[in-house]
Amino acid sequence: MSIEVLPATVFDDLESILGPNRPDSNVCWCLSYRVSSKMNLALRGLERGSLVSELTAQDPPPGVLAYEGGEVVGWAAVHPRAGTSFARNRKIPHVDDRDVWSVWCIRVRPGHRGKGVSHHLLAGAVEFARSHGAPVIEGYPVDNRGEKVDLTMAYVGTRALFERAGFTKAALTDSVLNGFPRVLMRRELS
């Protein structure tokens, strides 16, 4: 399997993995941590996709996409923490005042799961942050201790996934997802 991870600058490609079957549906579009709670609740239907389209044209774009043979097979949201709701999140602590980047969503298309795509996505997110001058990157996966995580909640990743990508536990959090505690995992980039 040859996986290529690239910045998410093509809206049609991003839409193919994040967009709804019906354009007017209120799906996440991976905006829940990227915008304020107020804005996230206010955006409806086509407005959500329009905002994501605008984000793909910004520098940096909203994350990275994994491709296999030209087909989008995965997505990872990665952005400076200061531009996300993690900047104000009371359950996820700030370790220090550095210009940290966050990776908070890793999604693999059905039919491509269990093939290592998430590992490529996380590595791609790390390189994307590094290429934009990030001194450190962090994620907030569940510490599931090898237990099965419900697929609808697996988007945050697991502690083991982050450890295999060179991240180390930097702090506990007050956040719980799918019954599992979330931990703050960090990787130095400089």
Image: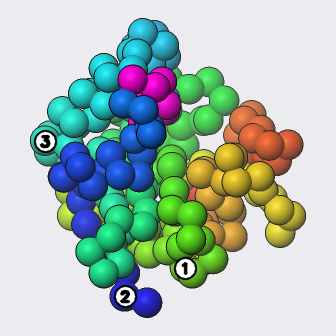
Q: Do callouts 2 and 3 mark residues in contact (Cβ within 8 Å)?
A: no
Q: Amino acid at mark 2?
A: Ser
Q: Amino acid at mark 3?
A: Ala
In the image, what residue occupies the spot 82% across and 47% down? 180
Q: Position of residue 96 (x, y in %)?
A: 48, 41
Residue situated furthest front in the rendering: 22
Q: Give the image location of residue 168, x and y in percent.
A: 61, 65
The reply to whether the magenta stretch includes residue 26 is yes
Q: Earlier in the sequence, mark 2 or mark 3?
A: 2
Where is residue 142 shown, x and y percent of the image?
72, 52
Q: CA distance from mark 2 to mark 3?
A: 27 Å
- Residue 21 lies, with reference to residue 45, above or below; the image says below
Per the model, the C-alpha gap separating discs 3 and 1 is 28 Å
Tell me, yes or no, whether the two marked residues, 3 and 1, touch with CB atoms within 8 Å: no
Left or right, 97 with respect to 166, comes to left
Residue bearing mark 3:
57
Residue segment shown in magenta: 24-31
Q: Is residue 186 left or right of residue 132?
A: right
Tell me the amino acid under the disc marked 1.
Gly
At 21% across and 64% down in the image, what residue appears? 131
Rendering quarter of residue 83: top left
Tell me the residue that label 1 is attached to.
116
Residue pointed to by mark 2:
2
Q: Quadrant of residue 3?
A: bottom left
Q: Residue at 70% of width from left, 54% of height from top? A: 151
Magenta span includes 27? yes
Give the structural element (helix, strand or loop) at label 3. Answer: loop
Observer-nearest residue: 25 or 97?
Answer: 25
Give the CA distance from mark 1 to mark 2. Answer: 11 Å
Residue at disc 1, secondary structure: loop
